Image (cartoon, rainbow, N blue to C red):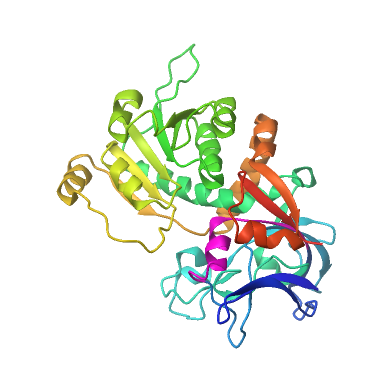
Amino acid sequence: MRAIAVTPTERIVGIINQLEPRIITPTDVKLRMIEAGVCGTDKEICAFEYGTPPSGMEQLVIGHESLGEVVEIGAKVTRVKVGDLVVPMVRRPCPHDHCVACSSRQDFCFTGDFTERGIKGQHGFMAQFVVDDENYMNPVPKELRDVAVLVEPLTIAEKGLAQVWNIQQRLPWGCPIVPGKAQAHCHKAVVLGAGPVGLLGAMALVNAEFDTYVYSREAKPNPKSMLLESIGAKYISSESVAIEELPNIIGNIDLVYEATGASSLAFAIMKALGTNGIFIFTGVPGRKGPIEVDTDLMMRNLVLKNQVVFGTVNAGRDSFENSIRDVDTFHKRWPNAVKSLITGHFSMDDHRDLLIGKSSGIKNVITLN
């Protein structure tokens, strides 16, 4: 079968031929991979910033945002059946018995010895066939076939929002209900960046009844600003509005969802985070020079305004299931907006332009046949 892989020692990106995987254990599931999304992580691996092949191998098959169809199951598989569409999970537990998280929530692994398909220590999903344990399969309704590849990037927002709801149990945070009136937005969120993670995060926040603003570089109108306005979010361009002005326009910012990986922008907007606010980091900056940060102001705000800052990466089963549910909700609520997130379908032979070149659009997808 064909697969898209990197060879870090030789700095090669290309299509390789592999033996088609076989079911070995009774709980194995074989997938015919339908498509894989291209994300910033894939491009960084192809720039050889990171990415670790499986032990004893020179090559790493990349790809972690994917959709597959079950074509064969082991004798003891009960979670899926032949013909099901599934989105597989990415992270696998570390081998240590003392890691409490990896018994059920490997996305919170304590040891750092986890593996991740397509990223660290295990082959990914940009291959024509994959075999994996049923425990990592998440069934997807057939009617989501055209947009299901968005499930995995949305899990980032789902995991972040689940933590937000848990954290904010620390204070009375519910929106007031006035008899006879529609419930108004009472929480204001700012999304940094209008890439796929930012746009999906904005959809999740609008769906959760946040008054949602997306702060990005490109002047409006543009395709992303029009998409956001079609779902009820507001777009603010950094070309016309400085960061310092955001509180004057928005009011108390209850939540910042960072989706750029730009540390200078993130720490600048952290100054605008409101009382009792939460700041979620999802991006990983590249290796650059240090930036100046007013740590005194940051510390004063964190203490005096009861603020919380946390980072989130990868996701557990609950986030995948919530993501499938919400992709379905988004698809029914904003069908045109959701479909427009996927701006291009390409063959495996086009992989270099997508992974090495400066590709355009929002989310590009590789068809794996």
Lateral position of residue 80 relative to residue 159, left or right? right
Looking at the image, residue 286 sits to the left or right of residue 333; the answer is: left
Image x and y of residue 69, in percent:
79, 59
Q: Is 219 left, or right, of 241 in this rendering?
A: right
Res. 216 image quadrant = top left
**Farthest-out residue, top:** 180
Q: Toward the viewer: 240 or 331? A: 240
Q: Is residue 119 magenta?
A: no
- Numbered circles on residues, count: 0
Q: Residue at x 30, y 47 (%)?
A: 267
Which quadrant is the N terminus positioned in?
bottom right
Q: Is residue 47 magenta?
A: yes
- Residue at 74 percent of width and 80 percent of height: 25
Give the residue furthest to the bottom: 56
Residue located 75% across and 45% down the image? 146
Name the quadrant of the C terminus.
bottom right
Q: Is residue 141 above or below residue 329?
A: below
Q: Please state which of residues 221 and 27 is positioned toward the viewer in this rendering.
A: 221
Name the residue nearer the viewer: 186 or 257.
257
Residue 109 picture quarter: bottom left
Foreground pick, 250 / 94: 250
Measuring 41% from the left and 71% from the top, which residue is drawn there?
110
Q: Is residue 284 above or below residue 129?
A: above
Picture coordinates of residue 274, whole percent (x, y): 28, 35
The magenta-colored residue range is 33-50
Percent x, y of residue 324: 65, 47
Q: Position of residue 326 (x, y in %)?
A: 62, 41
